[in-house]
């Protein structure tokens, strides 16, 4: 006796909604890991996703931190970092790179060498030296190495006020700070106003290039809640703008707007600082105010 046939599975119907295998621009973040999700690679990937880009990541350090501070960190060997980045670059067309926490001079040299080998990829360098809560995220001699290696590879350099002061040899006047850092080879320097003139009700960020001020961007000062990861968010948002084909001033403007809106919608996930809300649909906010 012939066996009965099993159930027949009908082929799935064809629909007009065919997904096209077109990849969005890839932004590669090179930064430390923050287990709290407020800063570092975790914050960068959330920002990249918000811009509709593909996020790739190379880890420079494992940190023990929360929303209150950094308690300790361990940097990866430069060879491990180099291998991570080169593996991504060999496989995926990267449209922009964001460089955050490096931790050691060896890591800074490794990233500088990679950027030198890939001069067509724009790089936003956020020279992270300490966490918002004050904990150190860098070895003491990293500052000296950054000048001669990484800064000449920076399309946009985004230090906060304290970092800018240290990196410029103690300068405090914005024009003097910008001149010093531009002489190191960075194409653009963004001096952020969030930590300056705390009594002012308006925050003004200033973009410099080749010895002159290119643009100013102003927005209302928000209540001081610490904002764990705000610098990571801004630098990554600028990298996304560059990956999308915008000029540096345009990318800086869109990055500042995104970061301001994320800070305005910030929330407090733990017992410490507020975290920028990178999950809001900012393109709709951009349309509707």
Image (cartoon, helix red, strand yellow):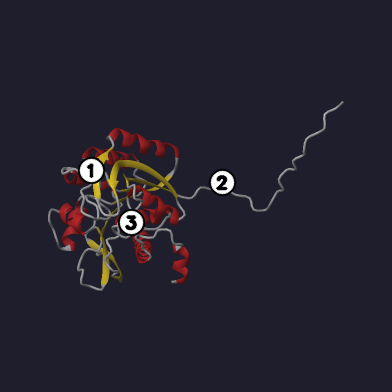
- Residue at numbered disc 2: 21
Residue 67 location (% of width, % of height): 30, 54
Residue 91 location (% of width, % of height): 44, 37
- Residue at numbered disc 3: 270
Q: Earlier in the sequence, mark 3 or mark 1?
A: 1
Task: Give the Cα distance between marks 3 and 1.
Answer: 37 Å
Task: Give the Cα distance between marks 2 and 1.
Answer: 38 Å
* Identity of the residue drawn at 31% across and 58% down: 230
Residue 165 location (% of width, % of height): 16, 56
State yes or no: discs 3 and 1 in contact (Cβ < 8 Å). Answer: no
Residue 106 location (% of width, % of height): 23, 37
Q: Nearer the viewer, mark 3 or mark 1?
A: 3
Q: The residue tagged with tag 1: helix, strand or loop?
A: helix
Question: In which quadrant will I find the C terminus?
Answer: bottom left
Task: Give the Cα distance between marks 3 and 2.
Answer: 39 Å
Residue 149: assigned label: 1
* Identity of the residue drawn at 18% across and 62% down: 175
């Amino acid at each position: 006796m012939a066996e009965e046939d099993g159930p027949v599975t009908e082929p799935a119907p064809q629909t007009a909604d065919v997904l096209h295998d077109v990849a969005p621009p890839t932004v590669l973040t090179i930064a430390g890991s923050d287990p709290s999700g407020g800063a570092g690679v975790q914050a960068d990937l959330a920002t990249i996703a918000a811009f509709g880009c593909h996020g790739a990541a190379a880890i420079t350090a494992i940190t023990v931190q929360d929303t209150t501070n950094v308690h300790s960190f361990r940097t990866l060997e430069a060879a491990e970092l180099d291998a991570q980045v080169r593996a991504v670059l060999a496989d995926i067309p990267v449209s922009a790179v964001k460089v955050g926490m490096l931790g050691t001079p060896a890591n800074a040299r490794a990233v500088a060498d990679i950027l030198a080998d890939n001069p067509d990829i724009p790089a936003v360098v956020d020279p992270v030296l300490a966490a918002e809560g004050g904990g150190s995220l860098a070895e003491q001699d990293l500052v000296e190495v950054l000048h001669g290696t990484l800064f000449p590879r920076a399309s946009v350099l985004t230090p906060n006020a304290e970092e800018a002061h240290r990196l410029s040899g103690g300068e405090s006047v914005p024009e003097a700070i910008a001149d010093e850092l531009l002489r190191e080879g960075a194409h653009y320097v963004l001096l952020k106003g969030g930590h300056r003139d705390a009594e002012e009700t308006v925050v003004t960020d200033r973009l410099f290039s080749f010895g002159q001020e290119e643009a100013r961007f102003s927005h209302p000062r928000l209540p001081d809640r610490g904002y764990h990861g705000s610098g990571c968010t801004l630098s990554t948002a600028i990298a996304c703008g560059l990956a999308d084909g915008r000029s540096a001033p345009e990318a800086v403007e869109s990055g500042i707007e995104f970061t301001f809106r994320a800070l305005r919608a910030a929330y407090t996930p733990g017992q410490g600082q507020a975290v920028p809300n990178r999950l809001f649909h900012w393109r709709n906010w951009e349309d509707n105010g």
